[in-house]
Amino acid sequence: MKRATKWLACLGFVLGSVTASGIKVQAAAEPPAHIKKMDGIFEIKEGSTSSVDENGIVTITPNTSNSIGSIWSTNNNLLDFTKSFHLSTYLYFGENVANVGDGMALVFQAVTDSPTWFTSNASSIGYLGEQRNENSVGILNSLAIEFDLFSNITDSDGWFDQNLPTTNKGQHIAYTWPGDLTEYTSWWAWFNTQRAIAHHDPLSYLLTDDKWIRLDVDWDVESKQFQYVIDNSTVVNVPYEELYNRVLATNTQVYWGFTGSTGTYAAPQKVVFQEVPNLVEVDPKIEVYNETRTQAVLDGGEVHTNETLRFDYSVEYLGGKQNWEKVKAIFTGDPNFVLEPGSITATAFIGGQAQSYPLDDSILVDGILNFPMEGVTGPTLGLEGNLPSKMVISYKGHFTSDISSDPVTLTSQYNGENALVSAPEFTMNPVANVAPKLAFSEDQDWQVLDTDKEKVISGTFEDLSKGSLNLEYYLDEEQIHQEKVDSSTGSGAWSLELSAEQIAALASGEHEFKVTATNLVSQSATIQSVLTKKNVPVIENFSLVNEAETIFKGGDANFQVTWRDEDSNHVQFFYQLDGGEPVELGTKENSAPGSSQNFEWSLSTNELAIGEHDVVLYAIDSEGITSQKAHLTFLVDGKVSFSAAPQDFTLETALPEKKMKVKTALSPIQIEDKRIQKSNIALRARLVDSADGTKAGFNSAAGHKLPSDAFIYQNGAHEQSVIDEVGIELLQTDSQEITQVDQAGEAGFYLELAPWLHAETYQATIEWQLIEAP
């Protein structure tokens, strides 16, 4: 800082310096994009040399000696520290490194009834206390960010800048508490009061090198963090406790503005603003939507080449102290992005209603889109009347397959007359599309039988482009099915089931089966194979020859078979009895393919148990195809029979002296019933004609005959029955496994003899009848 001297001896030198420096005139560096309309934002205080030109460039002090400048926010543009805010501004100090002074400061002072708009010029920079007055302070209840062009470190210059870096000609940036007397150090030297001000976080910085210096200020009300950033690189945090105690404890409503001064030396000290806190509150966004995949693209995510992408550059006016006036925008994309013709649209949201209109394709040049076109006034955004509250610029297209894999960054810059904002950058990573891959399952069976109720054909796919695949299935070039499968993991499985109806409709022989997979950008892969339909030999009928007949154990079960085969040379038949091992029946020549043919075969029941038996019949044709199995159940039944049959018997005896009965010794007569369904049985005996024609009865060779009642059976109850030509029933019993004729004790068979009979040999034939009675 350079103070104005009071010594006459130095005055001519100062004047000479001013005259010399006034000769040099050069054009200043062009300011960056900035707010041009300053109406209602700041006001220049009386006594200040500050000014604002028609382009919104604020001159705090002109390049003349002993000037003081001061602009402050209006009462409608106070800072409210109960809300977060961001301030973005640029400062300019000219290009003359030597003989420049004195500097300027961004000052925040709590709102009071008696604010201070500026103090002194020269080394005080319009905001500090007086150099020679030990009781003087600067702007009360304030925080200042100082940009000092001159290092005041001698008696003649003042001592404000003690213990600061001396590089960069002593030019520096620091923050101070100008209204607090404890921040000043005063002493007496050289017959004068000397003073220094405490500089916090000083930064040596060359300010006068013909560049605009960026200054950003951020306040986060949640974290209570106040910081400022120099040229997007150096960050300085101001302790909240200090800020509260020295400023905000007085009032959270704060005036803010710039003061500046020159002294013996001068500089053109200028300011432009890009974003004034809470003046215009907007929400700018860049969003990308993948229309091919019907999903949003995440910032930093992958996008595949040749996929249709939609870029949405939007900005929404949320509120503020002013409408956002005459907004123009610059959107930057990638020059390799291929625009979809006719896809550029602008959409204005007015009163919640969207109104869209097309824009000419020519406004997108090398990936850069300017809106509106040159010479057209940009829209004003606001919340009232017919003003749009939101604007969206959209266009579609795709990246070509030969684009590099370097990240693509989208940016948007909105330049309104009273606010300039940018959306956060959006980055995408282009990835080349790779055609999908298809494969059949390794164990796929390519034979289908005409009897199959279904046939599953399966396989796998790879899709490095991810997303989804469209699968098409063809049989003999006819599409039989189509489906979309999820391929977001990059791989998966597919399968197709042919129905019984589809199988039945196939002719015998070979058929081409084909699968085609198409990814989201129409890249495809195809695989194919041969599916062969085989005809199964058919057993049309398998039955007993005479199902009404009972099959008795020991007899044969006689079967008849009707079969048909469409295309084989011969058919081999097998049967399985009661689940046993297959037994070959033999081979039948297929003499009439496609026609029904017959044969019979017999199965002996000698070795079969009485009861039900299951026989399974199947055929294998000459191509190795097995028919369906035919099942048949048949019954083997038992009989009623003599397990001990009566034999021929002989009775040798002399004629008695008187009539008497003589018991004969017949062998046991035992009956066995092996029927499954047992019922009553009866045993009858009668005399019948002999084989040589002799009439029934006991006859001798001489022609004599025993009486017809001579042969008698007596049961255990001594009841007697004559066995003659009519015969008698010897026993009747209900179902039993084994029964026999009683011959125990006095029971048995007798001949009744008398003395008057001829003593000869008599013979008779006895018929034993087993009767199955219901």
Image (cartoon, grey):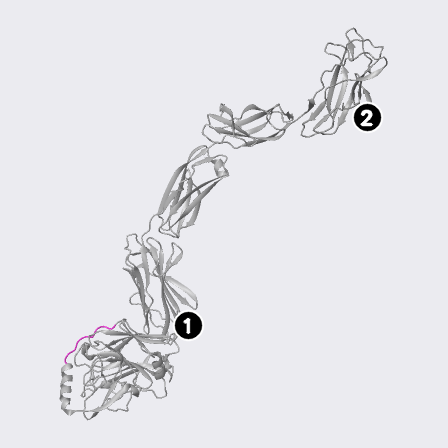
Quarter of the image containing the N terminus? bottom left
**Cα distance in 3D space between marks 2 and 1:** 132 Å
Q: Secondary structure at mark 2?
A: loop
* 350 lies above or below 696: below
- Predominant SS along the magenta part: loop
x and y percentages locating residue 458 in the rendered image: 43, 43
Residue at the image position 28 percent from the left and 52 percent from the top: 402
Q: Residues within 10 Å of mark 2 (few under 14, many from 20)?
A: few
Residue, far bottom: 191
x and y percentages locating residue 205 in the rendered image: 22, 76
Q: Which residue is mark 1?
A: 385
- Side (left or right) of 628 relative to 642: left
* 601 lies above or below 299: above
Residue 310 quadrant? bottom left
Residue at the image position 69 percent from the left and 25 percent from the top: 672
Q: Which residue is mark 2?
A: 717
x and y percentages locating residue 138 in the rendered image: 29, 87
Is residue 75 visible to us here?
no
Please check the rendered image and state whether residue 302 is part of the magenta-colored stretch, yes or no: no
Q: Residues within 10 Å of mark 1 (few under 14, many from 20)?
A: few
Residue 732 is tagged as none
* 210 lies above or below 458: below
Q: Earlier in the sequence, mark 2 or mark 1?
A: 1
Disc 1 residue type? Answer: Gly
Total number of numbered labels? Answer: 2
* Viewer-nearest residue: 3 or 419: 3
Magenta part of the chain: 22-31
Disc 2 residue type? Answer: Ala
